[in-house]
Image: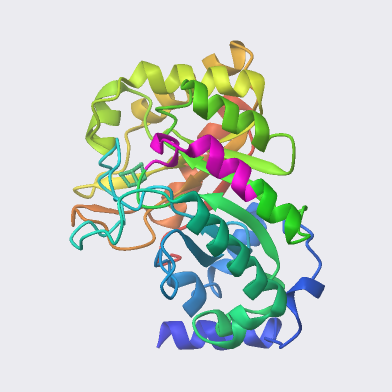
Amino acid sequence: MIQRASKMALQEVMPASNQNPAEVSPTFFSCTQADVRYNAGVDIIAAHLDHRRSYDDFYYVYPVISRRSQGVSIGVNLNPDKICNFDCIYCEVDRRTAPRTRSVDLVVLRDELSAMLGLWKSGELFAREPFASAPLAWRRLNDIAFSGDGEPTTCPVFEQAVACAWECREAAGVSEAKLVLITDAACLDRPGVKKGLELMVRGPHEIWAKLDAGSPEYYRRVNRTAVDYNRILSNISRTAQAMPLWVQSLFLKMHGQPPSSEEIDLYCGRLTTMQTEGAHLLGVQAYTVARPTPEAWATALESHELDSIAEVIRRRTGLEVRCSYGPSFN
Ligand code: SF4
């Protein structure tokens, strides 16, 4: 019932249309605090909720309506084997079902990406649900994002995949669309990854590097990985010294407990240290759980709790903080 009411409200303010999305202005919709609050009551739309990383019989490429970018994001899954170097307590990847393939075939990836860009340009993508529910303003193409069923930078052909995405973007005539990397930062020090990033930053791009904790102990509890915490900090800092990036942080409750003020203080200290080292941090994407987690005790923060954390981060670091709230919008 809530979903139906929200969808109707959205259609009232931004009526869906059959207009070709290629004609929609590619202007980036700034995701300010006010924007998020405004959208909080109306963005539960079918297209946004449907974050399945699959489309027809495609192996690697999938479209989503992104709440954060308020546009279409074409995802590229470089981890079809569903293996990740993290095991986050909030991970939404369905690892109960077997993967259809375990490796990345660059020829197939190129075909799928070209086809998906064609579907978006022609408007055919919006001919059926869940994309038919997307309002016109959210049908613009925002980005091609490397984010899938694992950590994209662990893919052995990451560098070639970036080149492939670059070439498909140019061939489709959508050079304003960003190439986005969403990463847990563990492999940003690998030579092949660095080369891929060097290509990516020659055009419109964004790098979102995950940092969910201010202490190694909390990091191990949330991200459950053997990767050394200091390696994550070092990789984010060093990469940001060469290319500006966003820090992406998920804050949540564990067994009903939000992160302590001491943990948030430590987290802010990590960001401040990076800035002192010369890291160019564009800001923090602070978000919380929006979909079911594999651990029932890992739950979303209330909106006011996320707001409080965001305010501390702003005050302590001077960074812009953009919030994406949980499912209840309370
Ligand atoms: S890094 Fe991403 S894909 Fe890997 S476990 Fe965490 S949320 Fe899942």
Locate the N terminus and report the quarter of the image it occupies: bottom left
Tell me which segment is drawn in magenta.
151-165
Which is more toward the observer, 273 or 46? 46
Please, what is the dominant secondary structure of the magenta stretch? helix
Is residue 154 a member of the stretch shown in magenta? yes
Residue 113 figure quarter: bottom right
In terms of depth relative to the viewer, which is nearer, 126 or 167?
A: 167
Q: Is residue 45 visible?
A: no
Which residue sits at x=18%, y=48%?
A: 255
Residue 171: horizontal and vertical position, in percent? Answer: 74, 57
Q: Is residue 75 left or right of residue 299?
A: right
Residue 57 magenta: no
Left or right: 195 with respect to 1? right
- Whether residue 213 is visible, yes or no, is yes
In the displayed image of the protein, which residue is found farthest to the front? 107
Ligand 1, seen in the image, is in the quarter at top left
> Image quadrant of residue 226?
top left
Q: How many marks?
A: 0
Q: Quadrant of the C terminus?
A: bottom left
Q: Position of residue 153 (x, y in %)?
A: 44, 36
Percent position of residue 193, x then y: 51, 29
Colour scheme of the picture: rainbow
The answer to which of 119 and 305 lies nearer the viewer is 119
Residue under the point 38% across and 43% down: 251
Residue at point 60% right, 69% down? 115
Whole-percent x, y for residue 194 in the image: 56, 25
Quarter of the image for residue 50 reads bottom left
260 relative to 174, above or below: above
